[in-house]
């Protein structure tokens, strides 16, 4: 069953075509990767899905809903969470506080009940902390739970941003270059973590990634973009051997990209 369907997605910035008739369908439970050289339009797809950009043409359906007819703040309510190329965390807050912040969309209390600190508010806070602690354990972030984000290594901050996205309890997780800035060991651990998110948390993952080893190891299907257009969509091994993809990455017509 499909969870995300993108059809004929197009967007122009002035005279520049960022996306042209991009179409792909992602099945529920998949790890689906968008690849392509810089400027291919990968992050632009994410920005259209999350309503940061308004496409000039096309449709995006998620779980039966027309995403493009919804207000941007409703996207998280649908069950879509994302990370960013450049880390977007509150650097003066702790890891725990950053993750708790993501629970805001799920709150059932209001200003009055919180001011009176009713039992329902207390129960909600206890539950949220329990869920966040589980995410911290899942991502092996326990040594950093009370540390300010600004004092953490880059790779750990990437994991914190991933944890904040998980705290939204998404059905679809958008990961924008999750391995950027990580060393080989961190990338290997990240690949295991993403597979665990798919397998144990049962969350579908749409990923933009430049590390082809990571893409080929964990993806169920891959869509290759170049100059805002789809080159090919298929299984990782099909993408890996495709001459158009190889040429887009390496400028040559034979060989392999990973």
Image (spheres, rainbow, N blue to C red):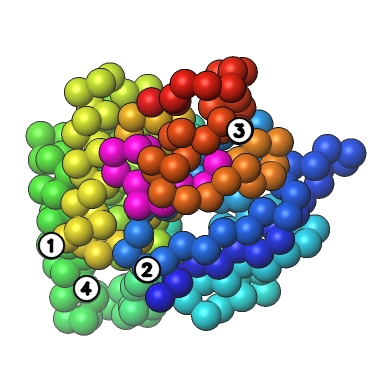
Image spot of residue 252 (x, y percent): 59, 18
Image quadrant assignment for residue 141: top left
Per the model, the C-alpha gap separating discs 2 and 1 is 27 Å
Image spot of residue 246 (x, y percent): 54, 27
Q: Earlier in the sequence, mark 2 or mark 3?
A: 2
Which quadrant is home to the C terminus? Answer: top left
Q: Please give the range of residues in magenta.
A: 215-224
Per the image, the residue denoted by label 2 is 28
Q: Residue at x 44, y 34 (%)?
A: 240
Q: Residue at x 44, y 42 (%)?
A: 238
Per the image, the residue denoted by label 1 is 130
Q: Earlier in the sequence, mark 3 or mark 4?
A: 4
Labels 3 and 4 touching (C-beta < 8 A): no
- Regarding residue 170, the answer to whether it shows in the image is no
Q: Earlier in the sequence, mark 4 or mark 1?
A: 4
Per the model, the C-alpha gap separating discs 2 and 3 is 28 Å
Q: Residues within 10 Å of mark 1 (few under 14, many from 20)?
A: few
């Amino acid at each position: 069953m499909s969870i995300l369907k993108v059809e004929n997605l197009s967007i122009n910035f002035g005279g520049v075509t960022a996306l042209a008739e991009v179409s792909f369908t992602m099945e529920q439970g998949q790890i689906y990767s968008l690849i392509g050289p810089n400027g291919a339009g990968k992050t632009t797809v994410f920005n259209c899905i999350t309503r940061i950009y308004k496409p000039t043409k096309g449709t995006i359906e998620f779980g039966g809903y027309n995403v493009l007819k919804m207000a941007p703040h409703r996207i998280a309510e649908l069950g879509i969470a994302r990370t960013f190329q450049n880390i977007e965390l509150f650097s003066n807050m702790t890891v725990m506080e950053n993750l708790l912040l993501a629970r805001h969309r799920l709150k059932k209390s209001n200003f009055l009940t919180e001011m009176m600190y009713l039992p329902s508010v207390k129960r909600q806070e206890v539950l949220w902390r329990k869920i966040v602690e589980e995410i911290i354990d899942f991502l092996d972030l326990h040594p950093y739970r009370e540390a300010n984000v600004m004092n953490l290594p880059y790779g750990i901050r990437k994991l914190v941003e991933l944890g904040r996205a998980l705290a939204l309890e998404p059905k679809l997780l958008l990961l924008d270059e999750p391995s950027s800035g990580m060393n080989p060991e961190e990338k290997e651990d990240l690949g295991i973590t993403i597979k665990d998110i798919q397998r144990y948390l049962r969350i579908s993952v749409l990923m933009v990634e430049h590390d082809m080893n990571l893409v080929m190891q964990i993806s169920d299907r891959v869509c290759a973009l170049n100059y805002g257009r789809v080159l090919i969509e298929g299984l990782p091994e099909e993408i890996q051997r495709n001459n158009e993809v190889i040429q887009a990455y390496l400028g040559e017509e034979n060989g392999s990209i990973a």
